[in-house]
Image: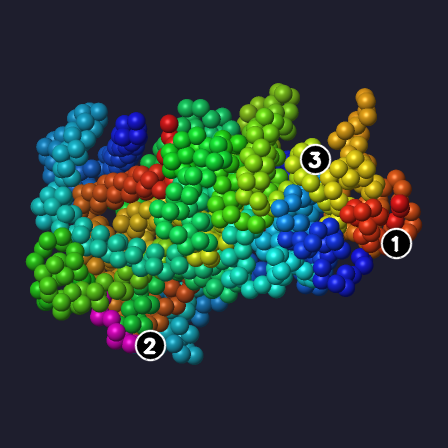
Amino acid sequence: MSVAQTQSRSVLAGIADDPLLDISGLVVETGPQRAPVELLRSIELAIPRGARVGVVGESGSGKSMTASAILGVLPDGVRARSGTIRFDGRDLTTLPEREMRRIRGGEISLVSQNAVASLNPLMTVGAQIAKVCREHTGVSKQEAWARTVELLDALGIPEPDVRARSYPHHFSGGMAQRVAIAMALICSPQLVIADEPTTGLDATIQAQVLEVIDGSVKASGAALLLISHDLAVVRAMCDIVAVVYAGSLLEYGPADEVLNRPLSPYTQGLIRCMDPPEGEIAFIPGRIPEPGTLGAGCPFAERCEQATDACRAQQPALRQLRPDHWVSCHHE
Amino acid sequence: MRRGFWLRYLGRRLLAAVLALFGVAVIVFVVTRLLGDPVELILGQRATPEQAAQLRAKLGYDDPLPQQFVRYIGDLVQGDLGVSNYTQRAVTDEIADRFPATLELALAGMFLGLLWTIPLGVLAAQRPGGWVDRVSRAIAEFGLAIPNFFFGLLLILLFAYVLGWAPAPVGELDIGATPPPRVTGMVVVDALLAGDLSTFSSALKYLALPAITLAVTSCPPILALTRTSMITALRGDYVRSARAFGLPQRTVRWYALKNSLVPVLTMSAMTFGFLVGNTVLVETVFSWPGVGLYSVQSMQRFDYAPVLGVVLLGSAIYILVYLLADLISMAIDPRVREGQT
Amino acid sequence: MSAEPVSAAAWTPARVGSRLRPLLTPYWALLLLFALVALLAPLIAPYDPIQADLEAKLLPPSSAHLFGTDENGMDIFSRVLYATRTDLVVAVLGVAFAFVVGVPIGAMCGYLGGWLDELFNRTSEIVQSIPLFLFALMIFAALGNSKTILVVVVAIVNIPIFLKLTRSVVQPIKNQDYIAAARLAGQPTSRIVLRHVLPNTLGPIVSQASISAAYAIQITAGLAFIGLGVELPHPEWGSMIQQGAPFIMDGDWWVSVFPGLAVLLAVVAFGGIGRQIARRYDR
C-alpha cells in the first residue's frame, strides 16, 4: 500500500505559496463494500493560482476520475474513501452538498470532451449558459443573456446573438467546444478543468480550440487543469505537468523539466512514444492494469524495464529529487 | 422555410393517415363481404331465403365486387355507416349519441392513468431497485395481468357493496335522474356547464370506478416506459454536465424529464387511442352507455351494422391520435423536426 | 443479443440442460400447476361441472363446495378446474397458429426485404390500427360464434405481432458474416433462414409467444364475458365471471372472484415466464 500522508496538504504544495488546489492522499474506490476496487490510489496533485497544470496519462489512468472527484460528481457507486481536496482553503471532501453546488460551475468549472453530448439537446445553447449564470450569480434573465452573448462573441463565435438561439446539434465540433468553454467561463471561475477538450476534433480545429482556451483563461486569470492523453497538447499549453498512471501520480513538475528531463521511467517511455527517434516506432510493452488487479508495489513495475523486486514490493513515495520536481520511483 | 416545411410534413402524414383508414375500410369490406354473408349481417340469422334474396338484390349484393366496393367507399366518405336493424335509425346517429360517453370515460381514465404512472415512473427511475421502484413495478404487473372487467367487478365489490362509497354500476347517473342539457354529450362536463353541481358530483361518483379501472389496467406500460426513459435520460452526459455546473436537483430532473418526454408522449397517445377503442368490457361491467356497450348490445341483437360502424370509428380515432402524437413530438424535440428533411 | 452465432446443429444436451436450469422459479411452478390441472381435471374435480343442483343455489364457499356454487347450483371449484382446459387450450392453440404463420413470414420479410416486406409490414400496421376487441367483434359477426372462431381471432390478432417481431430481429442478423458465408456456399434462402437465422433469433420470439399466451387468456376470458366463443354451460373462466357479475351487489362474491383469480394467476404465470426468457436474451 502507498505511504500514508500524515499532513493534510500534499507534498506538492511546496511548489507555490498557498496553491489554489491541492489534493492529498485521495483514494477513490468502487464496488461492493466488502471488496472495493481502488480507482485512484492515494493520488496527489497541486495547482498554483493562475497556473496551467496538465495531467497526462493513458486512457484508464484515472485522469478524468480525478476531475470528477474534485467536483464531487463521481458516478453512482464510486466514492472517495479518504484523502483531502483543498480548494481555496476549504476541504471539498467534507463540504455539504449545498456548498459544493455553489462551487461547481461558479468557482470550479468543467469543459468536457464531447461538447454536444454534454449540452441539453432540447434547449438553446444561450438558454443553457444563461441558466448556469443566473444560478450562480442571481442576475436577471436579460443580464444573463447579455453576458452570454458577450462571452460567445469573445470566444470567436460569429453572430453570437443568433447562434445563442440555436440548438446544440447545430454546432460543429469546434464551435460546440467554444460553447462548452463559454458555459465554463460564464461565472468567472477560479479554476477551469478541461477534460480532453480537443480529442475527437480535426487537427486544425484542435489548434483553434486550444487557442481559445489559452486566450480566455489568460484573460480571466483562472487556473487551468488540462487533462489529456496527448503529450503534444500538454506541452503546448501547460506550465506544470503531472504524470498519472493507474490511479497514482508518478511524476510532477514544471513542464520543461518533466518533458525534457523526465525522471520516471514511465514518463520517459511516454515521451519516446510521442517523439520516437528517427525511423523507430516506439511503444511501451504491455497494457495499463485493470483497477483492482494491482498489488502493493509500484503500479508501473510490470511494464518497467528497470523494475526490481523492491519496485514490485512497495510503492515508492513521492520525492522531490530536483527543485520543484517530484517523482515516485525507487531509482534516481 | 419553416412554415412550408411544416405544411408539407403535415400533408404527408395526413395522407398516410387517410391511406391507413382506407386500408381498414378494405379489411372490413373483405371480412364482411367476402368471408361473411353481408345479408345475414344485416337481417340477422333468422332471415328467410326470400327475404335474403330480396335484400340482396335491393342492396346490390348481386353486383360484381369492385362495384360494391366503390359504392361502399362512397358511402363511407359521405358518413353513411348503414342503418341499425334494431332501431332503423342511421348508425351514424346512434354512434354520435353514444360516443361522448366513451370519450368522457377514456379521457378520465387517461387523466388518472397519467396521474399515477408518470410521477411513480420518475421516482422509480431515481433509485432503480429501490422500494419505490419495486412496489410500482409490482402494481404495474398486477394491473396488466388482471383482466380489466374483473378488476372493475372487484372495485364494485369493495367500494360499492362493502364500503358503499360508490354507487351501483348502472351507468352515468342514477336511474331516473335527469341528465343535464346536452352540450358536449359528456355528462360531467355538461353538468358543470349548466352549473348543476349536485348532478356534477353525482356524475363524478359514477365516473370514478370505471375510470380507475381503465387507469390501473391500461396504463402500466406508461409507467415502465417513463421509468426506462428517465433512467436513460438521467445517465445522459448532459445530466452529468448539468450537475457538474451546480444546477439544483430539480433542474437536473426537469432536464431529464423533458428528454424522456418524446417516447412517453408517444406511448401515452397510443394508450389513449387504445383506450377509446377498447372500453368494450369496462363499459359492459359498469353499464356505461358508450359505443363499447353499444357494440356488445348490437352483437347480442344480431344487429351488425353498428358493430362495423364502431370498428371504423375506433380505427379512425386510433390513427388520428397516433398522428397527433407524432406532431407533438416534433414540436418538442428539435432534432426530430430536422430529421425530416 | 448473444454474441456467438448458433446453428441448429448446436442443440446439444448440455445446451438444452443449461437452458432448463432456470425452470425452478415460481412462474414455472405455477404453469406446471395449471398444466396438471388441465390434464387431470376429471380426476381432481369433486363434482360434475355441468351438473345443476337447484337445491344448492348460490352457496358460499364451504367444505362441501370449496369455491361455493353458482346460480344453477353447479360447483364452482370443479368448473374452475375444467375451465382451465378450455382457456389454456384456446390460448395456446391460437398463439401456436399465429407463431407458425407469423414467424416464417416475418423471417422472410426481414431477410428479403423489398416489396414483400413493405406489403406485409403495411398490412400488419393497418390490422393493428383496429382496436382489438372491436376487431374480434367484427370477426365473430362475420363468421359466427363458436370456439373455433375464438381460436381464429386469437391467432389473427397475434400474427402481426409475431411477424413484426421476427422481422425486427432478423434484419440486423442478415448482414452478419456467417450468413454471408452460408450464402456464398450456395445454400438456398429457405435453408439459410431456417437453419442459421432463426435459431439465433428464437429468444425474443419465444418470450413473445409466452407473453402472447398470457394476453390470449385475457382476451379469451374477455370475449367469453360478453358471450362470444363459449358454449354454455361449458365451463370457461370468462363466462363464469359474467355469470357472477349480477350477484356482486348482493354480496355473493365467490361466483366471479374465483374464476377471476384463476385468469389472473394464469396470466401472471405466462407473462412471468415470457419476461424471464426475455431477460436471459437481453444479455
- For marks 1 and 3, give the one nearer the viewer: 3
Give how far apart the Cα atoms at labels 1 and 3 are. Answer: 33 Å
Please name the amino acid that badge 3 sits on. Answer: Arg
Which residue is at a point 18% across and 64% down the rendered structure image? Answer: B203
- For marks 1 and 2, give the one nearer the viewer: 1
Give how far apart the Cα atoms at labels 1 and 2 are. Answer: 83 Å
Please name the amino acid that badge 2 sits on. Answer: Leu
**Dot 1: element:** helix
**Dot 2: element:** loop
> In the rendered image, which residue does mark 3 sit on?
A235
Q: Is residue A183 left or right of residue C146?
A: right
Where residue B165 appears, x then y in whole percent?
25, 74
* Residue A127 seen from this side: no
Which residue is at a point 55% across and 25% down the rendered structure image? Answer: C189
Magenta stretch bounds: B161-170
Same-chain check, marks 2 and 3: no
Which residue is at a point 61% across and 51% down the rendered structure image? Answer: A68
Q: Nearer the viewer, residue B46 or B246?
A: B246
Figure coloring: rainbow
Please name the amino acid that badge 1 sits on. Answer: Ala
> In the rendered image, which residue does mark 2 sit on?
C59
Where residue A241 appears, x then y in whole percent?
72, 42
Q: Is residue C163 left or right of residue C18?
A: left
**Dot 3: element:** helix
The answer to whether the residue labelled 1 contacts the one labelled 2, judged by CB atoms less than 8 Å apart, is no
Where residue A23 appears, x then y in whole percent?
69, 55
Q: Nearer the viewer, residue B36 or A17?
A: A17
- N-term mark: 1 or 3: 3
> In the rendered image, which residue does mark 1 sit on?
A313
* Residue B58 seen from this side: yes
Task: Classify 10 Å Cα crowding around label 2: few (below 14), some (14-19), many (20 and above).
Answer: many
